[in-house]
Image: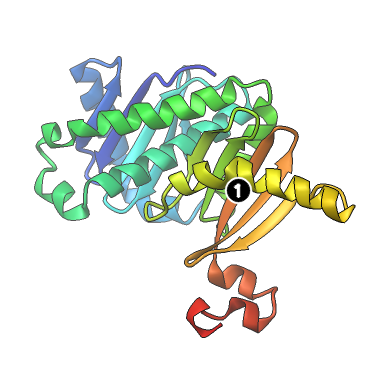
Amino acid sequence: MTEIRNFWVLSRNGIPLFFHGRKDASSQIVISGFFAAIQILIESLEQSQLNKIELKNNTYFYYLTGPIISVIEADPKDEIESQVYQIIAQRLGRAFLVMFSQDIIAKNENNSSKFRYFLSEYEKITAEVESMLTQSHREFLSEYFVQAAKDENVLGAVVYDLERDEILSSDIPPDYDLEDFESFGSMLFAFLGRLGKTLNTGAPNEVLIRCQKYWIGGFKKGPLAIFMLFDLEYFGKVLPEFVNAPLREL
């Protein structure tokens, strides 16, 4: 995967809050002014499918959320990379708002040093996704991870390598503990495999689990497992009412 050339988090006023990349200070001002100029189109952009701006030598992927715009400058080689860059822009934007509240952003809009601690989260997310795309199963991972990110019914997704017993990539709500997947990822499908042999039914490749706040749907393909999180109401539309009742009433 080609590298991210530059990344910005801008306020809705176009003021740089965080930057990582190779642009000099004057270039940052130009870029910030450029994105500030599109503020008159904000409402239209939020209602449209437009999520990137293509110029002669650069493509800018952006994500508008709350009081900020997260922007990635890159040169994607194909459509998969374009979709993944957009996912990274979304993930970074959401992560920024998890780390810094809207009040903090409003009070420190002109003090970018306040947001420098976001660097570690930026490096973590970008390294994770780039590592995922260097795997031999790049197309498989990208296809399902991209689909999950685009589906409004999917609240989060985790890609798990069952052979190496490790998470390859994740994008889950901030109130969910990633360690939960690390603890049961490989054990779950190992158990299902043994169960299938015992019952003479073959090893199940799909599983649906109800948790306190979410449904977790998982499926296995080769050495990989994909787990997706759905809200409780989503599966309540297709499952019997008693299955969707609050756990305390069961």
* Mark 1 secondary-structure assignment: strand
Q: Nearer the viewer, residue 210 or 189?
A: 189
Residue at screen point 62% across, 24% down = 78
Image quarter where the N terminus lies is top right
Residue at screen point 62% across, 22% down = 135
Colour setup of the view: rainbow
- Give the residue type at disc 1: Phe
Does residue 131 appear in this view? yes
Residue, disc 1: 227
Residue 41 vs residue 30: left or right? Answer: right
Q: How many marks?
A: 1
Image quarter where the C terminus lies is bottom right
Image position, residue 4 (x, y; %): 42, 21
Image position, residue 90 (x, y; %): 43, 42
Does residue 50 appear in this view? no
Q: Residues within 10 Å of mark 1 (few under 14, many from 20)?
A: many
- Among all residues in the image, which is located at the extreme right? 200
Image position, residue 215 (x, y; %): 57, 62
Q: Is residue 57 above or below residue 128?
A: above
Residue 105 vs residue 140: left or right? Answer: left
Q: Give the quarter of the image for residue 137.
A: top right
Residue at screen point 77% across, 52% down = 195
Residue 64 vs residue 231: left or right? Answer: left
Q: Nearer the viewer, residue 105 or 248?
A: 248
Image position, residue 203 (x, y; %): 81, 47
Residue at screen point 25% across, 34% down = 118
Residue 5 vs residue 145: left or right? Answer: left
Q: Nearer the viewer, residue 61 or 34?
A: 61
